[in-house]
Amino acid sequence: MTDVNKKARGQETMTIDANPLIRELRRRLSEPGPWARRFRRLAEAVAGSPGLSCEECDDVLDLYVDDELGGRDVRRLHPLVWQHLRACTGCRQAHDLLADTLSRERAGELPPVPCLGAPRLSFLQAHPPDAPWITRLRPRIGGAPFGLTFSFNLPYLRTLLSPPIPVAARAEDPLSPSASHLLLSDTVPVGEGTVAVQVTATRRPERPDCLHLRAIITASTPLPQNLRARLIWDDQARFGLVGPQGGVDFGQVSLATLQEALEAGEGSFEIAFEAQEIEDDAGSG
């Protein structure tokens, strides 16, 4: 009986090979050429469709691994991902790494993640409306220069200057601490250190109609050498370089004009310390 079947199959093969169309088709498939390449690309496209790209597979790979580790039938739940992993070596390696990591984590074989301390986000904290001033510290991100700004609350300044600051005695040094009126005193955490700032106002005998404003800035770590101070009052701006001891002199401000602005509740009054960018004059000229 077996010999009869073999004989029948042999006769069938001979009949197919005798067909000239079959022989021509086999010849074209065996010989490389445009027609054979087009046919091969078509066959590959049909065999691989539908499918996922590597990006699409990566988007759902965590779900696939989670179901797989949970004992679910991922071939039925994620058929396209299952097919892609069988054909793509790169995605299969990513799958194996993720599966191994999650398995070890669930088994308690991975070391615990260290607990990080709470970040210092004081610059994000809201200031109460009656705060005497608002402090803004420029974060040193991406190499940004140092910047520290104090924006005064106008009602607070109005309280300080009403009644006006007394005029310093002639026999007394107008710049001495006893002759100065403290407008601001604050300590700001900067990195691992602190920066302390004081702003004082004095009425000199020779100019009792003006306030002489000075500031001093000190720090637990060295400050930038090119530090500049800026006073902005309404539409006016005063600048001064911070000295070696941290002092800066803003000069005279009209007391009457300042009190008028404070009574109207308009304008702004702020003091800023900024590191200047050093210009390279080597290529100038």
Image (spheres, rainbow, N blue to C red):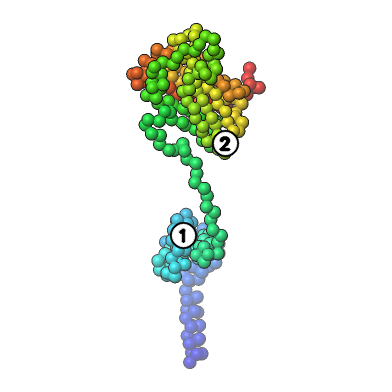
Q: Nearer the viewer, residue 272 or 58?
A: 272
- Is residue 8 among the parts visible in the rendering? yes
- Is residue 43 among the parts visible in the rendering? no
Tell me: 234 left or right of 91. left
Q: Amino acid at mark 2?
A: Gly
Compared to residue 267, the image places residue 34 above or below, namely: below
Residue located at (52% from left, 18% from top): 178
- Find out whether the residues at labels 1 and 2 contact each other: C-beta distance under 8 Å: no
Compared to residue 154, the image places residue 37 above or below, namely: below
Q: Secondary structure at mark 2?
A: strand
Residue located at (41% from left, 21% from top): 160
Q: Nearer the viewer, residue 35 or 212?
A: 212
Q: Nearer the viewer, residue 253 or 275?
A: 253
Residue located at (46% from left, 60% from top): 62
In the rendered structure, which disc, 1 or 2, sits on the residue that comes first in sequence?
1
Q: Secondary structure at mark 1?
A: helix
Mark 2, Cα crowd under 10 Å, few <14 / some 14-19 / many 20+, is: few
Task: Provide residue 267's location: percent of width, then percent of height.
Answer: 38, 21
Task: Provide residue 36's location: percent of width, then percent of height.
Answer: 51, 62
Which mark is drawn over residue 193?
Answer: 2
**In the image, farthest residue toward the bottom:** 1
Which mark is drawn over residue 61?
Answer: 1
Q: Nearer the viewer, mark 1 or mark 2?
A: 2
Count the labels in the image: 2
Which mark is drawn over residue 52?
Answer: none
Residue located at (48% from left, 87% from top): 5
Query: Which quadrant of the figure has residue 80?
Result: bottom left
Mark 1, Cα crowd under 10 Å, few <14 / some 14-19 / many 20+, is: many
Task: Provide residue 50's location: percent of width, then percent of height.
Answer: 42, 61
Q: Amino acid at mark 1?
A: Leu
